[in-house]
Amino acid sequence: MSYRHRCLAILFGLGLVSGAGPSYAQALLPYAPNLDSRQLEQQGITLTEDVLQLVRFQQYDLALPRAKLATQLAPNRFQTWFILGTLYLQEKEIDRGIEVLLKAQALAPEEAGIKFTLGSAYFQKGDYPAAISALQAGLQQKPDSTSALFDLGNAYLKLKQYPEAITTFEKAVGTDKSFWPAINNIGLIQYERGDSESALQQWQRALALDPEQSEPQLAVAVLLYKQGKTAEGLQQGEAALKRDSRYAELKFLEENLWGEKLLQDTRVFFANPTMQALIKNLPPVVEEKDQG
């Protein structure tokens, strides 16, 4: 399972989203020379509430210009910079996102959520050592963050620092016993290390927590097929891909951190005539918006 940016989750976690409905203020406020700096800052905070409601409804194209204006109105509030940086990441403008998030961090070094989001940005950029550094710094302030521990484990995984990755994934499961993605990724590591039996145990453990997850089920199918359990493997693979056809794409599997050995064995599995026929008839994938 891949590192996934958690825009809304972090913003909600910091208490930056209110329960009020969207008011959708105008992106450009009228010039008001009689407003003092405190009033302007309050305008920026109010505008930020609108931005967060737009993010809630995934209307990022409307949210971004408002977020930029909010930083001009309230430049000394970390929330405005944090939200703008998060939106830049959403739009895949990683370098600009990092630049803005660093401004937010300078204003509020005590906010772990900013460090976690910086970790996301560095991960997306492919700078895994920087991601690890940012995530570790955030975890020093908020050590029980399941998602941050998972993200840190994924950064270690990308660097093939497998012992550190496994330890971190286990910590994530320790904070949330039902968090199957970390268990799944331990299986990915075990498979790359050549321990297929341990990998199978981890994927079965993940499926015991959530039987509807296609990723561990497909991994189990590939492993069974490689072991010569052809019928069982094909049955499991068919069920997994019918539930979520995205996993029929090797690129998607690679994005979900499947390693070289598992990808190679998956290619062989997908080359089976039964799987080829199934994949050919799968409905086209509808690209989902990032939920944050």
Image: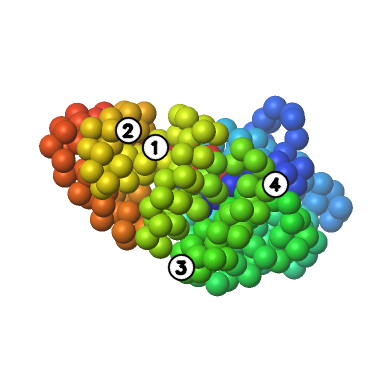
Measured Cα–Cα span from mark 2 to mark 4 = 30 Å
The residue sitting at 75% across, 35% down in the picture is 18
Q: CB atoms at circles 1 and 2 under 8 Å apart?
A: yes
Q: Which of the labelled discs sits on residue 236, or is there none?
A: 2
Judging depth in this view, the residue of 175 and 221 nearest the camera is: 221
Tell me if residue 134 comes above or below residue 239 in the rendering. below
Disc 1 and disc 2: Cα gap in Å? 6 Å
Please state which amino acid type lies under the numbered disc 4.
Answer: Thr
Question: Label 1, on which residue?
Answer: 217
Left or right: 36, with 49 as reference point = right
Residue occupying image coordinates x 46% and y 39%: 204
Label 3 SS = loop
Q: Spatial distance from mark 1 to mark 4, Cα to Cα?
A: 24 Å
Quarter the C terminus occupies:
top right
Q: Amino acid at mark 1?
A: Gln
- Earlier sequence position, callout 1 versus callout 2: 1
Point out which mark residue 160 bears: 3
> For mark 2, does the 10 Å Cα neighbourhood hold few (<14), some (14 to 19), or many (20 or more) residues?
many
